Amino acid sequence: MGDLRGLPSVDRLLSQAGDLVDRHGRMQVTRAMRAELSRLRTDRPDPLPDADAIAATVAADLDRRAQSKLRPVLNLTGTILHTNLGRALLADAAIEAAVAAMRDAAALEFDLEGGGRGQRDDHLRELLCELTGAEDATIVNNNAAAVLIALNTLGLGREAVVSRGELIEIGGAFRMPDIMARAGVTLREVGTTNRTHRRDYIGAIGPDTGLILKIHTSNYRIEGFTAEVTAAELAVIARDAGIPLVNDLGSGTLVDLFAFGLRPEPTVAEAVAEGADLVTFSGDKLLGGPQAGFIVGRRDLIAAINRNPMKRALRLDKIRIAAIEATLRLYLDPDRLTERLPTLRLLSRPQAEIAAQAARLAPQVAARLPGWTVEVCDCASQVGSGAVPTDTLPSSGLRISGDTGNAPERLAATLRAADRPVIGRIHDGALILDLRCLADEKALLAAFR
Ligand SMILES: *Cc1c(COP(=O)(O)O)cnc(C)c1O
């Protein structure tokens, strides 16, 4: 049993802890020292630690707790738009615009020309119309919110006709039937899982129909004996019946993905041209901006959405509006888009370049990992966030496997604990680091202490 009289006082510890007080403030340091002293009084270790050792324990604890859990990580999962890792990385222009909006007052709802009140969506409306060919546009918190408010505005107390092949779950709690129920809309399912026909929609439309909803089956694909009514055909059916067609594109994209070697996803402009009355899509999927939900389409319907009291609850702040505006502006210069927009830059990174990076890094990683085998391996990256779900992009990475006793789970845990946590994935007894999204090589090497 240690003699408790040997323990230093809080005042004495504090008098030597100038650095720590600078970093964390007097209140936190005092509290942590009291807690540590009280622990030592209870545990009575023998020998008792001296003042320096106690200060070191307190410092390590405070430094660890001061690290944000939201700190930047290296996404080496191979999934470019990883929902759990925050989806799209913003373009420099978007980051600068967001920072400027944060730092100063902004003319968010202020008309600089007339000096009167303005509308916060006006900053984006014109750009969205130009890029999509739509008549009007509005913006909300995310695409789930876009679907929710569109349904609630057009279909409250009425029915939405949807194909059974499109009743998606997007992961987490986003299930289309649940969103509909919360929007106050009755789901009117038509067709079957694999086949839905024009006559199914036409037969379901009646006096209670509020809208037809088409949902892009973004995170799965039904193949084989299938039939789907296209958005263009649905637009005709909807127009004949005098009801609106809403097309939820999910990711949506403003550019043709074919150029990136991916199966084409419908672009927003195409969906508008096909005759949907409203089109909804995400800001932080393929578009490559911050989290947001866009609704573009008919002016009268957009106006109705803007009058819905839910709009206020789902609106965006100045920071994100600034970042979205800067992101959308990049699309006005398609020639330099890939270079400027990280999502497209990562999507189009050639495998040869990634493989060269892997070959360069493998020996450096191996040198830091005795007892492990580090090999260059082929990878298949994914876009993620439900976009083009069945296509992969050839990539390259590191496959790290351990000698006996070295489990990949343990290495993965060590890498997650780094200052800049590294997130890979475990496959077949090895840790796989897909290098497609690796920019900061120093941070990766530093994680292998
Ligand atoms: C991703 C997705 C949503 C939800 O969009 P968030 O921006 O994540 O809210 C809705 N519908 C479809 C078809 C999607 O793919």
Image (spheres, rainbow, N blue to C red):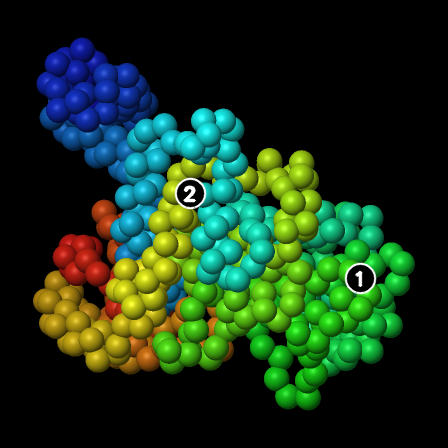
Front residue of 154/157: it is: 154
Give the quarter of the image for residue 198: bottom right
Height in image: 248 above or below 293? below
At horizontal 13% and vertical 24% (from top left) the residue drawn is: 19
Q: Tell me if I can see residue 214 in this picture.
A: yes
- The kind of residue tagged 1 is Gly
Q: Which residue is mark 1?
A: 242
The disc label shown at residue 320, or none: 2
Image x and y of residue 74, in percent: 28, 57
At horizontal 50% and vertical 69% (from top left) the residue drawn is: 267
What secondary structure is found at the residue carrying circle 2? helix
- 122 relative to 103 in the view: left or right: right
- 277 relative to 46 in the view: left or right: right
Front residue of 105/376: it is: 105
Which residue is situated farthest in the right direction here?
Answer: 207
- The kind of residue tagged 2 is Arg
What secondary structure is found at the residue carrying circle 1? loop
Which of disc 2 and disc 1 is earlier in sequence? Answer: 1
Image x and y of residue 235, in percent: 70, 69
> Counting other residues with Cα less than 10 Å from the Cα at mark 2, is it few (<14), some (14-19), or many (20 or more)?
many
Image x and y of residue 377, in percent: 26, 79
